[in-house]
Image: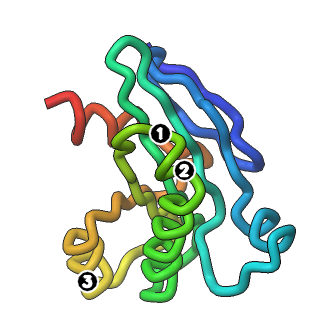
Amino acid sequence: MVRIVKTGKYRVQIPDSIDVVEDVDVEAFCREHGLTGKRCDVIVVLKEKGVGRTYIVCIEDTGIPEFRDLEKLDECIKLAKEMFGRRYRNPIYVKILHHSRGIHRNITSTLRDRAIEKQHCSHIIDFDRIYRARFCG
C-alpha cells in the first residue's frame, strides 16, 4: 500500500512502511541562514518503520532538465550531509530530478553516472517506485 504526503508545495507518494520525519524548503533555509549558491528545491527525510533505514531525498523540480539542475542536486546533497549527516545513522541519499518536458540524451547518460533518479512530472513525486526498484531487491 502507498500513501501521498504533502511536503511543502510538493506531494510525494511513499510506501506505508515509511514515515516523513522532516522536510526542508531549501530556498527558504538558505535565505534564513545567509547561504548562497544554487541548490535543489526541497529535502525530505524519510524513515523506514521496523528496519530503521533513513532516506534523505533531494528533489529538483524543473521544466526541461539542464546540467545546472544536476549541479543543484549535487550541491543539495552536500547541504543535506551537513544538515543531517550527524543526526541520522548511515542515511541513504537519493537525488530526484522531477521534470515536465523531455530530456536530452546527454543529460540522460549523466543522470545514470551521477545516480540521479528521473521522473516525468505527474504532479506527484513517486518515491514508492524508486524505493521498490532500488531498495527492495
Mark 1 / mark 3, whichever is N-terminal: 1
Task: Pinpoint residue 127: horizontal percent, then vertical percent.
Answer: 44, 40
- Which type of secondary structure does the marked residue at label 1 adopt? loop
First in sequence, mark 2 or 3: give its number.
Answer: 2
Where is residue 79 drawn, in percent x and y?
Answer: 56, 67
The CA span between labels 2 and 3 is 33 Å
Residue ID at (23%, 35%): 135
Viewer-side label of 1, 3? 1
Amino acid found under the numbered disc labelled 2: Phe
Q: Quadrant of the C terminus?
A: top left
Q: Which residue is mark 1?
A: 88
Q: Rate crowding at label 3 as few (under 14), some (14 to 19) or many (20 or more) other CA atoms within 10 Å.
A: few
Residue that carries the numbered disc 2 in the rendered image: 84
Say which residue label 3 marks: 105
Residue at the spot 61% in from the left edge and 48% down from the top edge: 123
Q: Amino acid at mark 3?
A: Arg
